[in-house]
Image (cartoon, grey):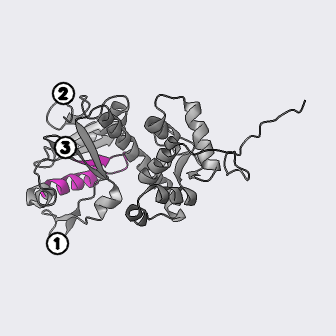
Amino acid sequence: MTKITKTRLPRYRKAKTPPPMRLTDRDKRVVEAVYQLRFLTRDQIKQLEFEEGSMTACQRRLSLLYHNGYLSAVHKLVPTGYGSSKRAYCLSKKGAALISHLYGEKEARQIKWNEKHNKVESFFIEHTLAINDVRIAFLKAVLGTEDYSLFWFNEQEVKAWKEKIDDPENSGKTLPITPDSFLYLLGKDKKAYFFLEVDRATESNRRWRDKIRGYVEYVKSGKYQERFKTSALRVLTITTSKERMNNLIKTTQSAENAYFFLFATFGQIKDKNIIFNPVWKSTDKEDLKSLL
């Protein structure tokens, strides 16, 4: 009898002879998610597509997608601080071709990707993964209800708006309006608008206060209402710890008219419904509140 040995796939490079695979609908969704969110860890992909399955099943499909060239990966420890991973998955040339095939002709022409998109600093990857933790939490919360749809604009899309406001404390200078994301929830008879700030405890109190002042002046000027056709706004900030959160709240309270800011930690949103559960702390009340 011939003994069949199982070949161990290399860990930090793609196999010269990849194992055979047949693309499933879920595989295609995984590649599309990586394209849309740019960098995703195995844990994040499991939350999106393998929540009812095992981590082993998730890892097996990711291995196939990686070694067959549909995904690339950053092969180093990514210390996110709230669920680290030794690999952050990103799109590949073959994966980009798959996305073009899946999308319509008009959408396919809008796909702008090249390998340089994967060659970025660790700081950028960590920041992107942190934002994606929040985005996934919102996606999961929306999936639990038929009452609302989620619309999300990433940091690059927001920067393209080139919004800024005159700084009343420094003549001739401006304050940029550059949240990490803009999102809104659309219901049958209600819209809820949010700017998102993901804080990894790297900004000084002065820098944070300038950012708060920018948002306040943006609303006071009417520019926010002009762009979004609404006066409703909450600025959501998610940070690393309760101590850091309390520090940000104290700094926010030092700015006038900063009443529309809400705060939470990554730990608070991890296992709770980010929309409907009371996980958010305001600047004026001790009790936690929900978004809707």
**Toward the viewer: 217 or 195?**
195
Query: Which of the numbered marks, if any, corresponds to residue 172?
Result: 1
Q: Does the magenta stretch include residue 200?
A: yes
The Cα atoms of the two marked residues, 1 and 3, are separated by 27 Å
**Mark nearer the N terminus (1 vs 2):** 1
Secondary element at image label 2: loop
Where 172 falls versus 181 (above or below)? below
User: Is 72 on the left or on the right of 273, as rendered?
Assistant: right
Q: In which quarter of the image is the C terminus?
A: top left
Q: In the image, is residue 97 above or below residue 197?
A: below
Type of amino acid under label 2: Asp
Q: Please determine whether, in this image, residue 238 is positioned above or below residue 51.
A: below
Q: Residue 234: horizontal and vertical position, in percent?
A: 18, 45
Q: Pointers 1 and 3 in contact (CB under 8 A)?
A: no
Residues packed near mark 1 inside 10 Å, few (<14), some (14 to 19) or many (20 plus): few
Say which quarter of the image contains residue 21. top right
- Quarter of the figure with the N terminus: top right
Residue 18 rendering spot, x and y as whole percentages:
70, 49
Residue 101 at x, y = what percent?
A: 49, 58
For disc 2, the marked residue is 287
